[in-house]
Image (cartoon, coloured by chain):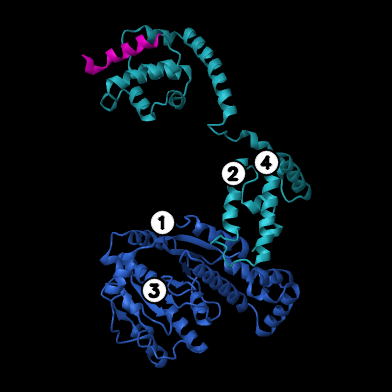
Chain colours: A cyan, B blue
Amino acid sequence: MDKKFSEMNYYEMLDVPLEATAAQIRAAYNNALQMYQADSLVSYSFFSQEERREILSLLDRAYATLINEHEREKYNAELARSGTLDVSGKSAQVKKEPVNLFDLSRQRDFFAARKTGNADLRKKIEQSQRIQEIISRSVLTGADLKDIRTELGVAVEKINQETKIRMDYLRFIEEDKIERLPAPVFLKGFVKAYLKSLCLEPADELAARYMNSLPGKN
Amino acid sequence: MTHIWPIGGGKGGSGKSFLASSLGHLLAKSGKRTLLIDLDLGAANLHTLVGVPYPEKCFSDFIAKKNLTLEDVKLATPCPNLFLISGANDTLDIANLPYEKKLKTLKAINKLDYDYILLDLGAGTSFNTLDFFLASRNGIFITTPEPTSIENVYRLMRAIYFRKIKHYFSAVHFRDLEQKVKQHFDEISFSKPERIITVIKKDFPEKYEQIKKDLDAFCFRLIINQMHKQDNIALGPQICKIVKTHMGMPVEFAGYIAYDEHVHDAVCQRVSFLERYPHTRAANDLRELGKKMSSSSGEQLSLNYL
């Protein structure tokens, strides 16, 4: 045993990393309660009553401190001062952490970013000769779509996120794997959504051209 | 290299013999020469589980006669590659094995040449059980998800820890330590090795380092048997975590075995459970466990008190 429980810092008590989010801390606290509560099967007979009371009060304090941003900062500063932890470098990383996909504040940014992104895309499409040349052709294949996409510098994952079309279908379309493609009625919709997410106009017509270029058609 | 897996659990009826016979069966099936030793002295019944109802040789013969080796008292079982040293006809005073006989047994076990040796230990925390459990780094704890059983498995873990600490102290020094612990804490503290170790850390730092190093080299494993559907699925990892944080004992969670009425049926029919009901949940869990454990067994320990 390297350290007594009462000598651990709050992060160690709850077994969370220094940069843990509020959700992680809450989950860790719930887990700890599951383990240390009086009716818990896990710690049954492991602790005396006083020991258990002490541990639970420590856990409560740890949770109350870490879940409150203000208190947590103060506690971190205290840890840094006593030299037990180097907090300075790590707290800066907190902002770089990926944000939850369903976070509301992020969603707003996401739509705003999409609007400005769309304007950028349109500009790029107008300026790129290669894209204009592909669009003006009478035949449009999956490989052409891929060319346009790479020319615009858009990742296939981004299209997958925006259109919710499965990744494998997107790949089959781009690689012209005719035998693996979905039924035409779906395919047409997929291609249209694909074109729209790249801001290619007119999506309807281009999609029809793609459908006509499929080998099965002739 | 011989792997020795002692199986202990504190409480009776938690499935030690069942686990020993099943793991033995699985290992033998996968082509490993496996020996089961029934060290549940005084309450042996492993022979019934592996289909040897009338063993003609037993562990007592080895203890009583000077010129016999463990090899001489081993029995073949219906399962090829699986051998048994039975305790069926042991003398009735076998439960209190004297110290020198125990050492003789431990030494003899160490000399055996098998791929795997499984020791089926008795319930409780008698010295015999503890020392046989410490015969290897790869001790397996088994418990059921019930307070009674968990209570006993914690007690067994503490007793083993305590025994380990005791190996490092002579009788005089140990009494000295006992005094100190009682000063620091209260009377009951002596039942908690984690408190003793804090005193050792302060007053005998070099001994603390030794014990810590020794203990860290162990690879204990925990199996939870008779898991019902409604039981908390996080139980196993949580037990290991609590033991690690508060006792400093490294225990790895190996897995669950589902509660299965078929086990009872198979035992009553006195046939091997895995052969009679190979496609039940408990059988699947056992196979999974066997696979996992045979791939992750560490090196063997040479007994440091022999």
Pointers 2 and 4 within a single chain: yes
Q: Would you name the residue on which mark 3 appears?
A: B17
Observer-side mark, 4 or 3, equals 3
Which residue has dot 1 on it?
B229
The question of residue A210 being in magenta is answered with yes
**Proximity of marks 4 and 3: CB atoms separated by less than 8 Å:** no
Q: Which mark is residue A90?
A: 4
- What distance separates the C-alpha of mark 2 from that of mark 4? 17 Å
Amino acid type of the residue that numbered disc 1 sits on in the rendered structure: Lys
SS for callout 1: loop
Label 3 crowd (10 A; few <14 / some 14-19 / many >=20): many
Q: Which mark is residue A24?
A: 2
- How crowded pointer 2 is (Cα within 10 Å; few <14, some 14-19, many 20+) is rated as some
Q: Is residue B49 left or right of residue B40?
A: left
For the residues labelled 2 and 4, say whether their Cβ atoms are less than 8 Å apart. Answer: no
State which quadrant residue B204 falls in.
bottom right
- Separation of residues labelled 1 and 3 (CA atoms): 23 Å
The answer to whether residue B238 is left or right of residue A177 is right
| Callout 2 amino acid | Gln
| Discs 2, 1: same chain | no
In this view, the mark in front (2 or 4): 2
- Amino acid under disc 3: Ser
> Magenta segment, which residues?
A202-218
Mark 4 to mark 3 CA distance (whole Å): 51 Å
Q: Position of residue B195 (x, y in %)?
A: 67, 70
The quarter holding residue A141 reads: top left
Position of residue A85 measured from the top left corner of the image (x, y, whole percent): 71, 48
Q: Main secondary structure of the magenta part?
A: helix
